[in-house]
Amino acid sequence: MLTRQREQLVPEQLLLDDGVLSRELSAGFDVSEETIRRDLRELAAEGRLQRVHGGALPPFSAIATLAGRKS
């Protein structure tokens, strides 16, 4: 799978699952965990997600929006 495709699918997955794990993305996309970590670093630099140990969460603005909907 191409980098561009992964960089489109990862944020979509974040919105569905409220977070992703690097090892699950690696297995799902059939690429190394290092490749996923590199993708996640790039997406975090663009503000499209938050990096956390072992994976990623939606960006802060998305979390605030979701929290507002629940109240």
Image (tube, helix red, strand yellow):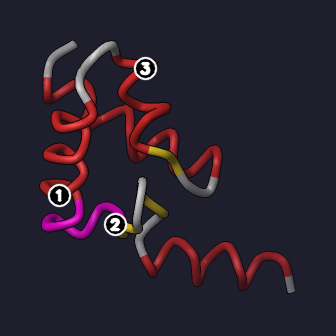
Expressed as whole percent of the image width and height from the top left, the position of residue 2 reads 15, 18
Residue 27, disc: 3
In the rendered image, the vertical position of residue 66 relative to residue 23, given as above or below? below
x 30%, y 35%: residue = 8
In the rendered image, the vertical position of residue 69 relative to residue 57, given as above or below? below
The residue identified by callout 2 is: 51
Q: Amino acid at mark 3?
A: Ala
Relative to 52, is 39 on the left or the right? left
Q: Which image quarter: residue 50?
A: bottom left
First in residue order: circle 1 vs circle 3: 3
Expressed as whole percent of the image width and height from the top left, the position of residue 23 reads 43, 35
First in residue order: circle 1 vs circle 2: 1
Q: Amino acid at mark 2?
A: Arg
Image quarter where the N terminus lies is top left
In the rendered image, the vertical position of residue 33 relative to residue 67, given as above or below? above
Q: Main secondary structure of the magenta part?
A: loop
Q: Does the magenta run of residues contain 47?
A: yes
Contact between labelled residues 2 and 1, with CB atoms less than 8 Å apart: yes
Relative to 24, is 68 on the left or the right? right
User: Which region shows up in magenta?
Assistant: 44-49
Query: Please, what secondary structure does the residue beneath circle 2 have?
Result: strand
Rounded to the nearest angstrom, the CA distance separating label 2 from label 3 is 19 Å
Query: Please, what secondary structure does the residue beneath circle 3 have?
Result: helix
Rounded to the nearest angstrom, the CA distance separating label 1 from label 2 is 7 Å
Q: Amino acid at mark 1?
A: Arg
The residue identified by callout 1 is: 41
Relative to 61, is 1 on the left or the right? left
Q: Does the magenta run of residues contain 45?
A: yes
Q: Residues within 10 Å of mark 3 (few under 14, many from 20)?
A: few
**Foreground label between 2 and 3:** 3
